[in-house]
Structures are given as C-alpha cells and as structure tokens.
Amino acid sequence: LAMGTLYDMVETDGGINVQDRGASGTGHGWAGANQVFWNCAGASSICQNPWVSAKNYNFGFIGEKNAGWNSRPDGMWVGYKRPGIFPESLYQAQLGSRLNDRGVFSVYQGLEKVNDSTFILSFNMPFLGDLAIAKNFSITGNAGYEGAECSVTALSDTSIKVVVDGIGPLPAFSSVTVNAVNMLSSTGEALSGLTSATYIEPDLRPVVTGLFARVNNEDETLGASSSKPGSIYLVKFSGNYDYLDDYKTERDLDRAVTDNLGRKVDAPFADSVMKIATKGLPGGYYLYYGVDEDGRLSAPADEWPEVEATGPLSKIDDAYTIPDFSVWSSNGIIFINPGDQSAHYSVQFFDITGSLFNGKRSVAGDQQFILPDYRGIMIVKLIAEDGSGIGVYKLVNNPL
C-alpha cells in the first residue's frame, strides 16, 4: 500500500489510478492512500477514497475521469479539465516554502516577464543594494539569450529588473533563466537556497486552419482563418518535407509572396474566414500560415490545398461519351482521372497553334504525363475507344 505519494506534473498515454482493486490480479486491494495527483495528464484517471481517515486527491487532471471498481466514493477532484492549477509544480512550491521558512536567503523560482527582453527577479529577503550590478547576474536558457549582456536595476530591496537585448518574440516553450551570484541579504546571509529563476514562454502562436481543395490558378479562391488577428499566408510547398526550414519567419513568407510563390491577406479579426485568390500562382501544393500582430508565426495548417496550373479549366467540346473525367496540371505533371477506372481512351496533346506534338493510345485508369519540352498553353483531347470524343481541355503546362 503506497502512502502519501505526490505525483507532480506527470504526463502519460496510459491511466493514473488510485483505487480499490478488489480481487484483480493477485488481490492487492487498495492501490494507495493519501495520494496527490497534481497537474497531471493521461488517457484516464481513477481517484477513489479508501476510508474516513485517508483521502486521495486529484488536482487539475486533463483526460477522461473514470469511476473505477467496487463503487467506492470519489476522492477529491479539484479543477478537472482545467489545466494550470496554481502553483504549476506543488513540489517546487513546497521546496521553496521549506527553504524560505528556514530563513535561507533565496531567489524565488519564478522569473516574471515584463516583455521579451525585460524580466523581474525576486528574493525572499532584502538584499544589499550595492550588489545589484550586472556582473552578479547571467542569462541562460534556450531562447537565444545565452551569454547575452544584461543591465540590472534594483526596483526595491527584494526585486531586480534585468534587461537584455531583445531578439523579437520568444519562441513557444523557450526558457530564459537568470542566475544570481555573490548576492548578500541586508543582514549578511549569502545565497544558500535557490540561485536562479526561470521563465518559460507559453505557446502564444496563432493557430491557422484552411480549406483543403483543388482549385485552378485563374478564377478561384481558398479560405483560411487564424485564431488571432494579424495576417494569413498561402505559400508554395517546396517539395522539401523539412518544410519548416523554408518558412521560419514572417520575412521568409513575405519573400515567397514577392517571388509569386504565395499570397498574403489581412486577418483583422480572429476566427474569421478570409478569402485568398489563387490567380497567377504556379501549380502545386501550398501551406497556410498565420502571423499575429506581434509577429508570432504559426505552425503550418494541417490542410494542404492544391493549385492547378490550368488557367480556367475549359472544356471546349461538350459532346462526350464517358462522364466524370477530370484533367488538371500541377508541378509540371498533367493528371487525367477518368472516373471509371476500366474505361479505355486515347490522349492527344496539341500546341496553341493546333499542331499535334504528343499523345498516347489505348490507356486505362489514371494517367500522368510529364512533358518537359513544352511550356505554356496546350490543348488536351481525349478520345474514347470507339473513336467518339470525350472532351477537349485547355491546360497550362509549367515543367519544373
């Protein structure tokens, strides 16, 4: 029987349970008493109370709440599905309290952010003001401040303002730690508790969602929305599946727009669908991004629309014998989908003057054609096996 255990900020894809297990397994009975789950997350959790003199607690759990076996009463559930029960870590809070209660001169573990380059460090006792100088403080973490010079100003006898050169908006989940050395309290105690405080940037990036569709590059639009006001971008996927290396900043997105590899629209309101015209874009797959008013760049949306390099896809001959044919061009490849995969047909390619320059007889099912020696407008004629016309289409071929 486990007694008085703290499960602090545990995350798992399984269950976190304290319950009467009855005769399951080897018949262990109760899994624990006086247990505390603090800001934990998992697939599910069972938290039952064993008897009057012992209780179990579950604070801020994220996941499914299950009743458990043997109809035992629930333990104490506080803040279910409400992440961020304060303090974030009960263990760290208890540690800090224990150190401070003993009269130890210590830094408070939480670093307060004023902006992306200004932070406030606090002490649990008044310090000697003459020691609030830059050489007694250093910056570490993973936000790009490592080793950066800082300026220090005493705000009070227990708090210090630390300013470093800003690098723009902090990346989500990045950390900044201020370390203190050589500090003395006003009564002469040296730092013997915590000597550093850390700030972790929450994920403040916008979330962008967009329409998955196949559209032409002449007279159609796509739609996308962002969870925060700012801008929405539609930019061409380069074919590099490490595509995050292509678009790391708003400047990268603007460069794609300048190079006619994307479009940018204003998004003055959160969660409002904005239309993005695709006229003139090269064919291929595209990515949606959002940038908020503070310059934070979203992750790419899950939806990847495809732009067809067809111009307006025009069917010139309306008399055809096989329905549901679709023809389009993307990334220098001409795609033909007959709908009926058993249908046999022939394909002919004509240049803009009407001269036949390529083709294929008696094919069936989906077909792809790469014509690297021809660029520009072409006419594609599809002919059924019996010689009747299926359709004539205009396409724009832009080989890579």
Image: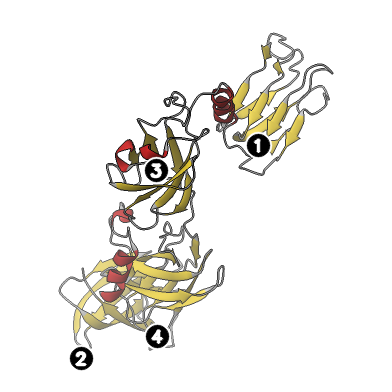
Question: Percent position (x, y) of residue 163?
Answer: 37, 51
Q: Earlier in the sequence, mark 1 or mark 2?
A: 1
Label 1: how many Cα within 10 Å (few below 14, some 14–19, many 20+): many
Q: Are marks 2 and 3 in contact (CB under 8 Å)?
A: no
Q: Tell us which disc is closer to us: 1 or 2.
A: 1
- Residue 58, image quadrant: top right
How far apart marks 4 and 1 lie (CA) works out to: 58 Å
Judging depth in this view, the residue of 181 and 31 nearest the camera is: 181
Question: Percent position (x, y) of residue 206?
Answer: 48, 60
Residue at screen point 41% across, 84% down: 219
The residue type indicated by label 2 comes to: Thr
How far apart marks 3 and 1 lie (CA) works out to: 27 Å
Question: Is residue 93 placed above or below 357 in the rendered structure?
Answer: above
Q: Tell us which disc is closer to us: 3 or 4.
A: 3
Q: Earlier in the sequence, mark 3 or mark 4?
A: 3
Look at mark 1 in the image and give the residue it sits on: 61
Label 2: how many Cα within 10 Å (few below 14, some 14–19, many 20+): few
Look at mark 2 in the image and give the residue it sits on: 353
Question: Is residue 326 placed above or below 248 in the rendered structure?
Answer: below
Look at mark 3 in the image and give the residue it sits on: 176
In this picture, residue 130 sits left or right of residue 397: right
Q: Earlier in the sequence, mark 3 or mark 1?
A: 1
Question: Percent position (x, y) of residue 14?
Answer: 59, 30
Q: Are marks 3 and 1 in contact (CB under 8 Å)?
A: no
Q: Earlier in the sequence, mark 4 or mark 1?
A: 1
Q: Earlier in the sequence, mark 2 or mark 4?
A: 4
The residue type indicated by label 1 comes to: Phe
